[in-house]
Amino acid sequence: MGCGASGMGFRKLSSECTAKIEELFAKIDIDKSNTITKEEAQKFFSHFSKVNAKALFDEVDVDGNGTITKDEFMKFWDQVRSAGYTNAQILEELENMAEGGDWVNWKDGKDVGYFNRDEKSMGIDKKKDVDAAPVTLQNASE
């Protein structure tokens, strides 16, 4: 049962996911202040740094104060897992981001107008595929 449900369908992050999330947070938090600033996010992302930083902040900076705390970052990934994504899917995206990949919009109940993970994995380019129908990844529990 590993990461399965405990009460009301809550899916937990695996210890491997949690460790990777903490590692990614530390990598983005350049000054080790336990918060991520927009400037740090822009320095972290290697392509379209301003767009990726904005997407990250639109999704994760819940209180809108211009910084992302470790708690906000962890709660965001808990939300993604609770939305039905598997630990394997989350790990794959975390590893991609740790290597300088783009931030994507997960189908987690929050739509901030950026690529969602499913569209990216299906190779949909919103700039080219304007009429592309939304793709839905079947949610699975581990």
Image (cartoon, grey):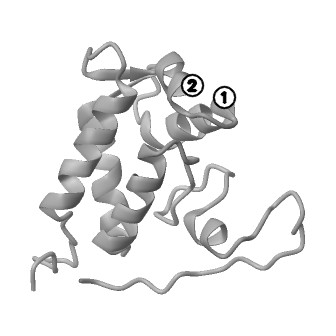
User: Which quarter of the rendering shows the C terminus?
Assistant: bottom left
User: Which quarter of the rendering shows the N terminus?
Assistant: bottom left
* Residue at 81% over, 61% down: 126
Secondary structure type for disc 1: helix
> Percent position (x, y) of residue 110?
52, 56
* Residue at 18% over, 60% down: 16
> Percent position (x, y) of residue 33?
26, 14
Of residues 115 and 100, which is closer to you in this image? 100
**Which residue is under mark 2?**
42
The residues tagged by marks 1 and 2 sit, at their Cα atoms, a distance apart of: 6 Å
Lower position in the chain sequence, tag 1 or tag 2: 2
Q: Are marks 1 and 2 in contact (CB under 8 Å)?
A: yes
Going by the image, does 112 lie left or right of 139? right
Going by the image, does 104 lie left or right of 40? right
Secondary structure type for disc 2: helix
* Residue at 56% over, 34% down: 45
Q: Which mark is residue 67?
A: none
Q: Amino acid at mark 2?
A: Gln
**Vertical order, 47 against 118 (above or below):** above
Of residues 141 and 79, which is closer to you in this image? 141
Q: Residues within 10 Å of mark 2 (few under 14, many from 20)?
A: some
Name the image quarter holding residue 72: top left
Instruction: Point out the residue furthest to the front here.
Output: 99
Q: Amino acid at mark 1?
A: Lys
> Percent position (x, y) of residue 62?
41, 36
**Vertical order, 42 against 130 (above or below):** above
**Which residue is under mark 1?**
50
